[in-house]
Amino acid sequence: MTSESALYLPQAWADDTERRNKAKVPSDIALQTKPQISLDQIKAAKAKGVAPGVVLADAGYGHDGGWRAGLTALGLPYAVGILSNLSAWPPGHGPLAPLPWSGKGRPTSRLRRDEDHQPMPAKALAESLPAEAWQAVTWREASNAELSSRFTALRVRPAHKDFTRQEPHPEEWLLIEWPEGESEPTRYWLSTLPADTPIHELVDIAKLRWRIERDYQELKQELGLGHYEGRGWRGFHHHASLCIAAYGFLISLRETIPPSGPARAEGGKAPAVPEGYRPRGAPDPTRAPCGDLDHDASDQTGHSPRPAPPAMSMLQAGHDSITATSQLMTQ
């Protein structure tokens, strides 16, 4: 499956031949989950030379152990949301080693658990920690105040189907947010960032996912990604491609505006005035003046534009007809 055919096809569409034909869905498009589609897109981006970075995702993707394993296989670190019921081994613990071979049958090499040795849900791990395990972390400034909350970070081993493995999962960061005043933790993340990553950096990276939500909102509302009203497979992909290209262009422009870009261009020269430039309204110096059209012409011989005004009579001061009182009139 190529990255150009990455539209999610629900089960009702995937199994409906008539509907697929009407919408012109390619015949090679099969049912895939959203995590599978996104992993294909990430693979395609990496193959095309897109600069790698830390993969961010919400719990709809991050809770999928197979999806996280796919990122690790690609050599990409991640900081992804998980649900509170994800099982993990507490710090310093892990699954039991395989049973020793008894000399009968095929020897087993799979890890195991028993009734007294089980992983814990992320929520239970959080609630088992002492109060001093939590610390306040500020990750960025909002419009009115700094964003801050309480966090803790533990080195744990995810327990996703490790009883089918011969080796336990590598240790990862379990980042948990428990805001002051809340009755229980509110958010959980797993991250494969290095073991020496400080907690404030973990929080800062995990919280960067708000930018994805903002980008998606701008794509849908400002650039029309959510305004497509067609019912064709190709038409939607054309529409989405144009919206994404337009957004990429706007982002490239935004990078040149402070504070993302420099306050002013360095090494630039002021544009020179072109030769022969004449400001608007200025007379053309190459043409002779035309007296007939010159509104400043002084030749008034032979005619008068209007009759001379009559002489105005003047009252002498102290005239007897003027009364001693006066009134102020307003309009």
Image (tube, rainbow, N blue to C red):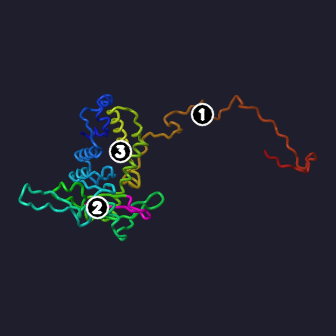
Residues 280 and 191: in front is 191
> Residue placed farthest to the bottom in the image?
132
| Marking on residue 90 | none
Image side of residue 138 versus residue 16, left or right: right
Q: Quadrant of residue 313?
A: top right
Asked if residue 207 is positioned above or below residue 287 in the image, the reply reads below
Residues 108 and 172: in front is 108
Bounds of the magenta span? 172-186
What distance separates the C-alpha of mark 2 from that of mark 1? 96 Å
Quadrant position of the N terminus in the picture: top left
Does the magenta run of residues contain 176?
A: yes
Residue occupied by mark 1: 294
Tell me which label, 3 or 2, sits earlier in the chain: 2
Could you tell me which secondary element the residue under label 2 belongs to? strand
Which residue lies at the image location 13% right of the left edge and 61% below the top edge? Answer: 99
Q: Quadrant of residue 8?
A: top left
Residue occupied by mark 3: 248
Tag 2 and tag 1, C-beta contact below 8 Å:
no
Q: Nearer the viewer, mark 3 or mark 2?
A: 2
Q: Residues within 10 Å of mark 3 (few under 14, many from 20)?
A: few
Could you tell me which secondary element the residue under label 3 belongs to? helix
What distance separates the C-alpha of mark 3 from that of mark 2? 43 Å
Does the magenta run of residues contain 180?
A: yes
Amino acid at pointer 2:
Met
Amino acid at pointer 3:
Gly
